[in-house]
Image (spheres, helix red, strand yellow):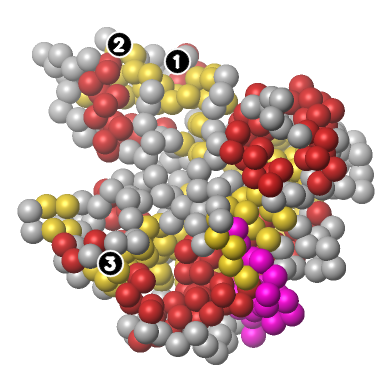
Amino acid sequence: MLNLAMLLDDSARKQPDRTAVVLGDTRLPYFAITAAANQVANLLTSRGIGPGDKVALSCPNLPYFPIIYYGILRAGAVVVPLNVLLKGREVAYHLDDSDARAYFCFEGTPELPMGQEGWTGFGDTAGCEHFFLITADPAAASSIDGAETFGAAVSQQPPTYDTALTEPDDTAVILYTSGTTGQPKGAELSHANMVMNAVTCLRLFEGSPLNPDIHLLSLPLFHSFGQTVQMNAGFAIGSTLVLMPRFDPKQALSLMQKENVTYFAGVPTMYWALLGALDDRVDVELLARNLRIACAGGSSLPVEIIKEFKSRFNVQILEGYGLSETSPVATFNHRDREPRPGSVGTPIWGIETKLIDPEWKTVEGPDQVGEIAIRGHNIMKGYYRRPEATEEVMRDGWFRTGDLAQRDEDGYYYIVDRAKDMIIRGGFNVYPREIEEVLMTHEAVSLAAVVGVPHEEHGEEVKAFVIRNDGAEISEDELIAWCKEQMASYKYPRIVEFRDQLPMTATGKILKRELS
């Protein structure tokens, strides 16, 4: 038997009074997080939700997230974390696609679709029977048909619960990813996937219950990076998580000083912002004495940032690589080996990697380009309810990532290109086809092509090339404003360029490489 929630259970038994979560002046010990998670589990059980049922969660980095996350797991149910920036239309899709029976939603994430009669729902999501609104206002749910206020719902539940006995291969979490085309797909990750990846992160970063870290957690917990590398791995050894609901470099530096942070994980733009925010009010020497681990993922870090960060903070940023489908960590630069700037390192413990061609044949020799394939304890069970999509990317235990890389003579991997057409904006994956399909629903749009263009702060920015319908007079600003209402803030195009035609191949495919 294995349940991901045991990572919290073990630390709560051994050091119940140790601080688990910090948010501003609020400091919650392990016994409080555990008791609250037990109340969530009892709440779900009282509503007839149990092993195997899917439960969605939209919540920023607040104490509610780990409480509800582990409460769902304790009940034997499956956590479906949702990006807090999604709009109502997008949430409706995820609830329906995941077969979610319940939904915990922090007030304002997303904006709830309201009508004259109150909550209008999220479309055709009849299977989602229970809606819990996380809010400080007890009356907030009164105007939402069928909703319950989270605080009132859990307040009468007992703080003890016998964690459900789940099997290692039972699904623990469904993380949504779009791949490179089409609608988002749910990667099913088992309890064994998630536990092994968290424990392997501890081995990788030399975490120990004898000297648990203090994490600054500014990566969103709904994303696999922060969820596994910091929350699950951190709770496994009794670490303290200092939560940031929204990353701000000046506030981050202030919290690092105040809380004596030893562990920071981020995407490249976060490191860029931290260096840019240093001023006379920052005690860099104190930060350098405390900071033990700095790790990065999401996209490649410029070598100059790595060098400057080490010179200022006296710690080497360790870069790694992974995907939602790999729980997520697959490769990393290791602390006991000389890191190689620009490289995503070598496979972590228990993981095999290789480069393959389109026919799954192994690409041999140093510096040859191939698609990264991964095999090991971190590989997902498959895409939820999508056997054909699963079959496309998995064979004989190997998962093909869609990312192209080179490997040097010592086995270090270097990403040379992302999956075809994918845009990485500020660490978030943006998938052009999804944006194009939304654009095509506008009455003024005849054809659209979306690409990523270089951006100093975000790495890439989303740009849309649009052919208008005959007679349409919409402006660039008007179309951007419309997109902002339809899509999450990290997705919608900030740049629109109207054209009379788009470059195409003889077969009618748009030549995106000619657009910039």
Label 2: few (<14), some (14–19) or many (≥20) C-alpha neighbours in 10 Å: few
Image coordinates of residue 205 in percent, x first then y, are: 81, 54
Q: Quadrant of residue 52?
A: bottom left
Give the camera-side residue of 507 and 174.
174
Tell me which label, 1 or 2, sits earlier in the chain.
2
Inspect the image, locate mark 2, and give the three-letter code of the amino acid beneath it.
Arg
Q: Quadrant of residue 448?
A: top left
Image coordinates of residue 166 in percent, x first then y, are: 57, 83
The answer to whether 39 appears left or right of 146 in the picture is: right
Q: CB of mark 1 within 8 Å of CB of mark 2? A: no
Range shown magenta: 1-22
Image coordinates of residue 31 in percent, x first then y, are: 61, 77
Alpha carbons under labels 1 and 2: distance apart: 11 Å
Q: CB of mark 1 within 8 Å of CB of mark 3? A: no
Inspect the image, locate mark 3, and give the three-letter code of the amino acid beneath it.
Pro
Query: Can residue 359 be seen here?
Result: no
Which residue has dot 3 on it? 138
| Dot label at residue 499 | 2
Image coordinates of residue 509 in percent, x first then y, are: 39, 25
